[in-house]
Amino acid sequence: MLLASDSGDLQAVMNHHAKSFSWAARFLSSSARQDAALLYAFARTADDLADEEYLGTLDERSLRLSVLRELAMQAGAGSGLAEDTGAMLRHHGVPNSVFGVFMESLQGDAGSCYFESPEELTRFAYGVAGTVGQMMCPIIGASQAAAPYAVALGMGMQFTNIARDVVEDAQRQRCYIPAQWGVSPQALATPRDAIEREQAFAVVARLLVLADDFYAFARSGFETIPQPNRRAIVIASTLYQAIGHKILRRGAGLYWQGRVSLSALEKSWLVIRCVLGSVEAAASTPRDVWQQDLAHLALLPGFPANA
């Protein structure tokens, strides 16, 4: 875990743990890149406390998450990762309510987790990732009008992460794919035969189709981001979406053979195409995910107004 916010350490954390986003971050302005690295390092530290059992018991990790939250939200606190992150977010005018939802969502994710409905899935994805999109908006110089699209992008990335981590999550007693989609956590983690594999992969594919809807909606708002930071966000969304498309291309026969990632060559090719402006539009037509998928979140503290 990272305890201080040395700029070299922050970039190293991003390079090691956020291999796709770190490629995109190279295209951010220097100030945005530094602040994004700080936010990522804090989020990674908090996420590790939620996920990693070797860091302590559930009660111990929950307490440490509470301490991180308090340190970050106390104006004028000392110098450390949490304090520096809080000061940076206040400098950019990020509301405490958005940061609070992020931390509460991680604390709720620290134990076993099973979702019954799609609404539970979207609420979780907003809490742990859509809020990060909101916090990134002022860092990259985007106006408040960009918030709905930033939320959608963060959530689309989270859906991609969930889709490729089903087996790993199952080992931690977690299943984020809604039970209402008709496949049990056990079948998702270790399907017994070819038929069960196809059924399990169908709901993974369903989640990736939902992710594509969110990427498409997010992309429709990219003009709200000033250059050069817009290019970085285009690259980040393209790389993450490509992970999902690679999962779909490989299909059910290969899904349970290991976690999917992009090779350096695949990333390089996609980055070049983004820079040249030759990446195709999202496979999904931008639909109003704000009304169709996220209307039930409207009363959450910090949730942005309708797009």
Image (tube, rainbow, N blue to C red):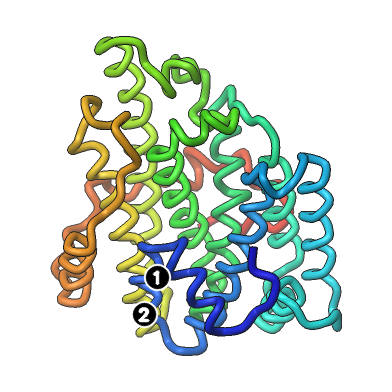
Q: Report which quarter residue 84 is drawn in.
A: bottom right
Q: Secondary structure at mark 2?
A: loop
x 42%, y 74%: residue: 224
In the rendered view, tell whether residue 181 sits above or below residue 60.
Answer: above
x 57%, y 64%: residue: 134
Which residue is tagged 1? 22
In the rendered view, tell whether residue 266 sits above or below residue 298.
Answer: below
Instruction: From the viewer's perspective, tell me whether residue 244 is left or right of residue 13.
Output: left
Tell me the number on the disc at residue 26.
Answer: 2
Q: Quadrant of the N terminus?
A: bottom right
Q: Report which quarter residue 274 is drawn in.
A: bottom left
Q: The residue under label 2 is which amino acid type?
A: Arg
Crowdedness near tag 1: few (<14), some (14–19) or many (≥20) residues, C-alpha within 10 Å = many
Rendering coords of residue 169 (x, y %)? 51, 35
Callout 2–callout 1 Cβ contact below 8 Å:
yes
Q: Secondary structure at mark 1?
A: helix
Query: Which residue occupies the extreme bottom position in the image?
Result: 30
Rendering coords of residue 100 (x, y %)? 75, 58
x 75%, y 60%: residue: 97
